[in-house]
Amino acid sequence: MVRRYLTQKPLVEVLEMMRATFPRPNRTIQAPVTGAAGRATTGPVYSPLTVPATDVAARDGFAVVSSETLGAGDRTPVPLKNPCRANTGNAILPGYDAVVMVEDVTGGEGSWSTRKAVFPGEHIHPAGTEIRQGEVILPAGHLIRPCDIGALLSYGITDIDVSAVEIGLLPTGSELVPAGERPGPGEVIESNTAVAAAWFTEAGATCTRYPIVSDDPELLRQAIGRGIRENDLLLVSAGSSAGTRDFTAGVIDDLGEVLVHGIAMKPGRPAIIGRIDGKPVVGLPGYPIAALTVIRELVLPLLAEWGFHARPRETLRARLAGTVTADPGFDEFVLLTVSRTGDRHTVTPLPPGAGTQMTVVRANAYLHVPAGTGTICEGTEVDVLLTGPRALIREAPGSPKPAPEHRVRGDAALPLKENS
């Protein structure tokens, strides 16, 4: 049966519905600290150690009894009665309460003197200066950064409990062939789930890519049932439109319920949001640009709500080099190429239907045109979101080179030479 779009919900409403409908999965794994960057702690992480465990030297020098250095000065060095050599980080033996830095000491073995008096505790890190046993290193829900790994290891932790999410990726379509096979007439290589896996893995999720399922409702039913049992979130790639071989919405509706079929966004309009056994099922359009848009604008925000964050996108202010014609009834996402001339940036809209995969490759930014906006004229300054590092934006061909710097010599301003 051909199914028409059941809804045409605004994107902002769909995002709010997903946040309200799908709470964070209660899944935890123990991960090696060395591989935990980008994951979130499930609870507070406490230190099993006191660091430093004892008083330690903060400078290279000699551990002393501070009261014995009173009166020391450049012209009145005071002999050290029983100094104990201590390098930075060495434990301070009982009975000593300060360190005289080596540069303030004169003399030789057995006859050391100090030219500077020290007070109790000077140049010493007391026990527990960094952290004491039982103190919190990281709070619950903390997104572990590379710099946190050093602290965790230093305080005696090698494994850590982190939040986990399992995502199933199910490609469908009789025209699909796996990567590595040569497609025949009317066939295409399946790539949408590979892109999704790369994005989700970057966010800290664990992904399972299932074999391609042909356009058969019963086979699709079995595959979706398995995917839901084994995962916290299931993405079904293709089969979400209203064609004669688009069965995804019907199968989801039979196994659970379709919450949304059709979203007021371009590309990505035929996307499906369903629920089976309380878990989210997202039906992706087969068109790659539309699938990527749904992943980026719907699924990644849900993962972020669950504590799994992809790399943040950088915003750039730039001038449009062409007019963007948008339907005011939709949120539209327009792929762009960004170029720079000096410190100014220009963005050029890419044709939406030309060379599907190469359009994505050539784009290094995109523009979100919110519903209700409509056309944006050439020359308008807009905020765009980069899909790569700002440093990789190329200089526009034919851009004028910056004027040479000048160095002032006397009253004359002379241009700098290349190798000066």
Image: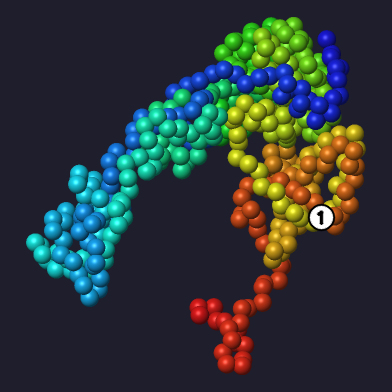
Where is residue 294? Give x, y as percent.
Answer: 73, 30
Q: Image quarter for residue 418? A: bottom right
Does residue 128 appear in the picture of this structure? yes
Quadrant where the N terminus sits is top right
- Total numbered circles: 1
In-front residue for pair 336/58: 58
> Would residue 35 be visible to someone looking at this image?
no
Q: Is residue 214 above or below residue 42?
A: above
In the picture shown, does residue 377 fall above or below 6?
below
Which residue does the image show at 72% across and 29% down from the upper left?
Answer: 298
**Percent position (x, y) of residue 293?**
73, 34
Which residue, given by chain and number where applicable, does mark 1 sit on?
A: 381
Name the image colouring.
rainbow
Q: Dot 1 surroundings within 10 Å: few (below 14), some, or many (20 or more)?
A: some
Q: Residue 51, percent across and down?
A: 34, 39
Q: Quadrant of residue 228?
A: top right
Amino acid marked by disc 1: Glu
Give the farthest residue toward the left. Answer: 110
What kind of element bears circle 1?
strand
Q: Residue at x 33, y 48 (%)?
A: 125
Q: Residue 231: which quarter of the image?
A: top right
Residue at 80% across, 51% down: 382
- Residue 12 position, x and y percent, is 80, 30
Query: Which residue is drawn at the image coordinates 86% and 24% (left, top)?
Result: 8
**Residue closest to the eye, 374 or 82:** 82
Q: Nearer the viewer, residue 252 or 30?
A: 30
